[in-house]
Image (spheres, coloured by chain):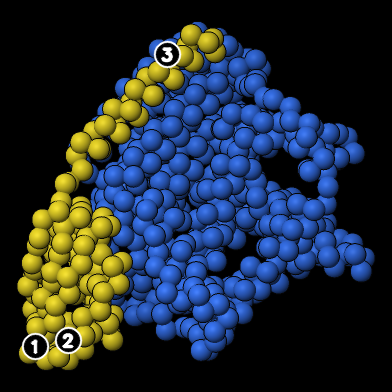
């Protein structure tokens, strides 16, 4: 077999140790036990619209901040500067070793891993950071940019497409560790997004065509901050709510939305699966197919893997939803039900994301610090003090990482099971039916959490 | 959901996480030993043995003998062995960080092996 470098995530090396077997068994046992406890404890809970009501607390002092233009201005400035930094350092910085190029850190760690985790923890940060929205808003101060065309009724399929394209760049192209490719992709996507906003209107395009806006919109639903707007669109109150419950809010139904959520789950899982021996076996088995393709073989086999995984996830999910509807024994629309339940899987995906990227965000992220002295590798001395900086592993010792991972996975699982229970109460009007309909969903969630756990516990393979 | 139900679920989750923490702490390896590992690098492309192990806080000495002149790089700890063909190059360090650290032939990035610190 030819040497294939295994790049976990976008780039860089992961030092994590897989979770020890005994801890994996403890966590897996805990997940099953707590799941059934939840079912027993929740039996006979509320049904109907009441089921999806959740507690929230008004925070009046946040209203002033939310209404002021400053968070958007500062966020937009940070976003635009980061975009410019990715393009400049990606094009003109060190190409030979991606760990010496800031574009890689900004794109794959600070934006892709950290912003997703923080948005789930705090609130939709992309709403503030989105550089393309900021550029558009700045432009419209000087020129009038009206929508030229009406966006056809395409749902969020364009956004799903761009999200998949980004996932392919990260996971299947084998080029995410080439800074200039990252820079070119960023420039191309900037053109597409600005053109989309100018042609079809700002919010029309952001909400249907901009993959990250849609993604962070879903993640923001998990977050504890909720803004309520009055009829004119002005923020009337800001609330704090428990993590996850925002996913119960009414959402547009549609296969495009379901596929988007499934893509979130499958791309995340695929990133983990890439480093497992199972993937190596799949790779080897398909060698006769992809080796003759030369340089494209790598891209082909990975993209095929990602698409197969996505389709499998989708089919399994829809299959389980048929069971949910069967046990709920109520005439409900498959599309509406599938859309409503899909969001309840988001907590499992988010905690897996946080667990999977834990040390990446805490340790690898520090690699950018020594680069500040000479970001383009031209022999500059901007901040000589940072050159000798050595990454601190203080929060990334195996014991700490494992503990954080197991606790995160279990908490996410509990939130997901609870949400799906409430959702079932809303959809299937008798509590006995709701409870019955819960079993397939519970099995699906346990299976999904087990997949997450076993990826975290799988031995990491490198090179070949 | 009533308060009693929330309390039951919360108590079970807290118990689960506390027991998990105790188990993880009890299973930590208590290193501190001195460990010497001799490795041989052949043709700037392979190393025997290739899988090195240590416990956290061990004092590890790695003696590298290479038949090619060049640099062997231990990632994570960021230690460079500047090898001269046929001579032994040694480095001693305390394995303070756990993890799975790659060892590479620096000029070609050829993977030679790993050091696993548990």
Is label 2 or label 3 in front? 2
The residue positioned 35% from the left and 35% from the top of the image is A447
> Residue A443, position in %: x, y?
37, 28
Quick one: A309 or B26, which is closer to the camera? B26
Badge 2 vs badge 1, beta-carbon distance below 8 Å:
yes
Q: Residue at x 47, y 83 (%)?
A: A95
Q: Position of residue A59 (x, y in %)?
A: 74, 30
Rounded to the nearest angstrom, the CA distance separating label 2 from label 1 is 7 Å
- Real-space Cα separation, disc 2 to disc 3, in angstroms: 62 Å
Mark 3 closeness class: few <14, some 14–19, many ≥20 residues within 10 Å: some
Q: Quadrant of residue A48?
A: top right
Q: Position of residue A433 (x, y in %)?
A: 49, 12
Residue located beneath label 3 in the image: B8
Identify the residue at image location x=34%, y=47%: A401
- Up-down: is A112 above or below A321? below
As drawn, the chain in yellow is B
The quadrant of the rendering that contains the C terminus of chain A is: bottom left
Of the residues tagged 1 and 3, which is closer to the observer? 1
Left or right of residue B11, residue A165 in this image: right
- Secondary structure beneath label 1: loop
In the shown orientation, is residue A359 left or right of residue A339?
Answer: left
């Amino acid at each position: 077999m030819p040497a294939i470098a295994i790049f976990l995530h976008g780039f860089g090396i992961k030092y994590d140790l897989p979770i020890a077997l005994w801890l994996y068994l403890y966590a897996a046992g805990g997940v099953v036990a707590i799941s059934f406890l939840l079912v027993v404890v929740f039996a006979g809970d509320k049904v109907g619209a009441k089921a999806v009501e959740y507690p929230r607390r008004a925070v009046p002092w946040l209203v002033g901040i939310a209404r002021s233009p400053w968070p958007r201005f500062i966020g937009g400035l940070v976003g635009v500067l980061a975009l410019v930094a990715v393009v400049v350092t990606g094009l003109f910085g060190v190409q030979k070793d991606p760990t010496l190029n800031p574009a890689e850190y900004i794109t794959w760690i600070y934006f892709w891993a950290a912003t997703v985790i923080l948005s789930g923890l705090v609130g939709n940060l992309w709403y503030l950071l989105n550089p393309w929205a900021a550029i558009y808003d700045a432009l419209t101060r000087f020129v009038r940019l009206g929508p030229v065309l009406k966006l056809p009724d395409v749902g969020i399929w364009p956004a799903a497409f761009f999200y998949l394209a980004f996932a392919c760049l990260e996971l299947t192209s084998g080029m995410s560790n080439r800074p200039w490719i990252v820079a070119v992709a960023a420039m191309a996507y900037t053109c597409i997004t600005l053109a989309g906003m100018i042609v079809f209107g700002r919010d029309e395009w952001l909400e249907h065509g901009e993959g990250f806006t849609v993604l962070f919109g879903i993640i923001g639903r998990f977050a504890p901050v909720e803004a309520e707007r009055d009829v004119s669109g002005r923020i009337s109150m800001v609330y704090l709510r428990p993590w996850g419950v925002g996913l119960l809010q009414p959402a547009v139904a549609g296969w495009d939305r379901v596929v988007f959520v499934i893509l979130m789950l499958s791309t995340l899982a695929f990133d983990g699966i890439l480093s497992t021996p199972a993937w190596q076996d799949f790779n080897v088995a398909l060698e006769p197919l992809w080796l003759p393709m030369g340089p494209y073989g790598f891209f082909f086999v990975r993209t095929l893997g990602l698409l197969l995984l996505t389709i499998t996830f989708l089919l399994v999910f829809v299959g389980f939803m048929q069971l949910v509807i069967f046990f709920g024994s109520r005439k409900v629309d498959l599309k509406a039900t599938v859309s409503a339940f899909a969001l309840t899987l988001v907590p499992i995906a988010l905690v897996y994301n946080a667990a999977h990227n834990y040390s990446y965000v805490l340790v690898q992220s520090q690699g950018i610090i020594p680069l500040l002295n000479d970001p383009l590798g031209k022999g500059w001395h901007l901040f000589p003090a940072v050159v000798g900086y050595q990454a601190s592993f203080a929060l990334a010792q195996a014991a700490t990482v494992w503990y954080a991972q197991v606790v995160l996975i279990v908490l996410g699982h509990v939130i997901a099971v609870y949400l799906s229970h409430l959702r079932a109460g809303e959809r299937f009007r008798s509590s006995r039916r709701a409870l019955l309909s819960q079993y397939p969903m519970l099995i699906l969630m346990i299976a999904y959490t087990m997949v997450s756990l076993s990826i975290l516990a799988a031995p990491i393979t490198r090179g070949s | 959901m009533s308060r009693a139900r929330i309390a039951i679920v919360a108590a079970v989750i807290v118990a689960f996480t506390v027991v998990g923490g105790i188990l993880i702490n009890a299973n930590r390896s208590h290193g501190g030993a001195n460990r010497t590992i001799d490795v041989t690098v052949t043709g700037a492309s392979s190393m025997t043995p290739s899988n090195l192990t240590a416990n956290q806080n061990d004092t590890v000495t790695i003696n590298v003998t290479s038949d090619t002149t060049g640099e062997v790089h231990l990632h994570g700890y960021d230690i460079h062995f500047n090898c001269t063909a046929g001579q032994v190059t040694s480095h001693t360090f305390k394995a303070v960080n756990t993890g799975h650290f790659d060892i590479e032939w620096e000029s070609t990035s050829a993977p030679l092996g790993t050091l696993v610190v548990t």
